[in-house]
Image: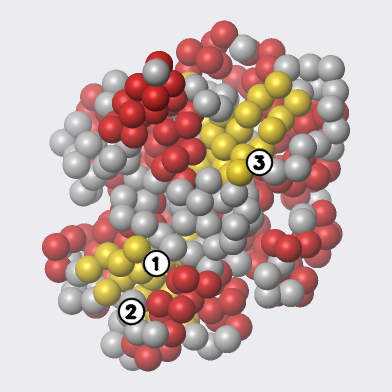
Amino acid sequence: MRRTAAAALAAALLLPLAACANDAASTSHNGAAPAGPTVEGPKVKIMVGGLDKVIYMPAMLTQRLGFFAEAGVNVELMSEPAGVNATTALLAGDVQGAVGFYDHTIDLQAKGKSVESVVQFSQAPGEVEVVSAKQADAIKSGADFKGRKLGVTSIGSSTDFLTKYLAVKNGVDTSQFSPIAVGAGQTFIAAMQQGSIDAGMTTDPTVANIVSKNIGSVLYDMRTPEGSKAALGGLYPSSSLYMNTAWVNSNKDTVQKLANAFVKTLKWMNTHTPEEIAAKMPADYAQGGAEQYAAAIKATLPMFTTDGVMPADGPKTVLAVLGAFHPDVKGKEASIDLAKTYTTEFVTKAAG
């Protein structure tokens, strides 16, 4: 009864919450991932908003490299097709950590909840706005979103609110276009082929599939720091490991072990080729073939940090984006204490 009540409360809190990017997974990699080697140490459950997504690659890669075991922590990776469910599970106490977008910490603080990023995987969203080949001549910027059907993973997802921000930034009100929930992967691609959407926001490996098949072209590329700055006005920290602040404060040794493992992975990614990284991942993640998967990783690699540290001005950019339209944040920016939405305590020690 208590768990049901907690889950219900968490779900209510998250109804308008921007879900993690790609919260509709393109494959059926749901439930628990195969466990890594068991070691003597604490057990931690981490929910990921799509284990097969390149933007969340550090989670599975850390397990595949054996760095969790090396750090002395037993991690069970779980995957939810809806990223918002990962945060719901965290708030309900079903898992101790979630891998998803940093923006959750800001939105939850506005709701009176304290959640913080403890390892910041990325400094850019990793998102791409792609335009259908049929609409390439008609949609040249966000100013052309008016009257259009724009694909997002789900309503209320990060792809949804980033799309809304790009529209508002270019003078189009959010009521002047239609966001269409089409998921990711094959459902996204099918929607574009069938004309159900004119353009849409997604990530790799979906982007790679669309471009390689000439189904669409890139309009806004936010896989790099430069792309993030151009589209959003600054670095936009997204994928991260975030946890309840109270749990972090009560389990610092365990959190440090997690930080040690993830920081080691981020450093490893920075010193290995996309092909080497792809070879470490589960074979079925390479839906378009090994070569295309490696290319997708190469295109997305610039978004990742090399040390897990939050970019200095990143939180301000996220707050500004959310404040432009998000009902839970707009007009309340001054009351948000960004210093409480992340910590560098653990990644700093991990680097030492």
Q: Which residue is tagged 1?
A: 182
User: Which residue type does callout 1 highlight?
Assistant: Val
Disc 2 to disc 1: CB gap under 8 Å:
yes
Q: Which residue is tagged 2?
A: 196
Q: What's the distance in space between the residues labelled 2 and 1, CA to CA? A: 9 Å
- Left or right: 270 with respect to 157? right
Q: Is residue 37 above or below residue 238?
A: above
Disc 3 to disc 1: CB gap under 8 Å:
no
Q: Which of marks 3 and 2 is nearer the N terminus?
A: 3
User: Which residue type does callout 2 highlight?
Assistant: Ser
Q: What's the distance in space between the residues labelled 3 and 2, CA to CA? A: 33 Å
- Left or right: 192 with respect to 273? left
Q: Which residue is tagged 3?
A: 32
User: Which residue type does callout 3 highlight?
Assistant: Ala
Q: How crowded is mark 2: few (under 14 residues within 10 Å), some or many (20 or more)?
A: some
What residue is rendered at 84% in x and 27% in y?
38
Disc 3 to disc 2: CB gap under 8 Å:
no
Q: In which quarter of the image is residue 327?
A: top left
Q: What's the distance in space between the residues labelled 3 and 1, CA to CA? A: 24 Å
Q: Earlier in the sequence, mark 2 or mark 1?
A: 1
Q: Quadrant of residue 53?
A: bottom right
Inspect this view and state whether residue 340 appears.
Answer: no
Q: Which disc number belongs to residue 252?
A: none
**What count of labels does the image hold?**
3
- Left or right: 198 with respect to 306? left
Comparing marks 3 and 2, which lies closer to the viewer?
Answer: 3
Please state the horizontal and vertical placement of residue 94, each as a whole percent of the image: 52, 26
**Which type of secondary structure does the marked residue at label 1 adopt?**
loop
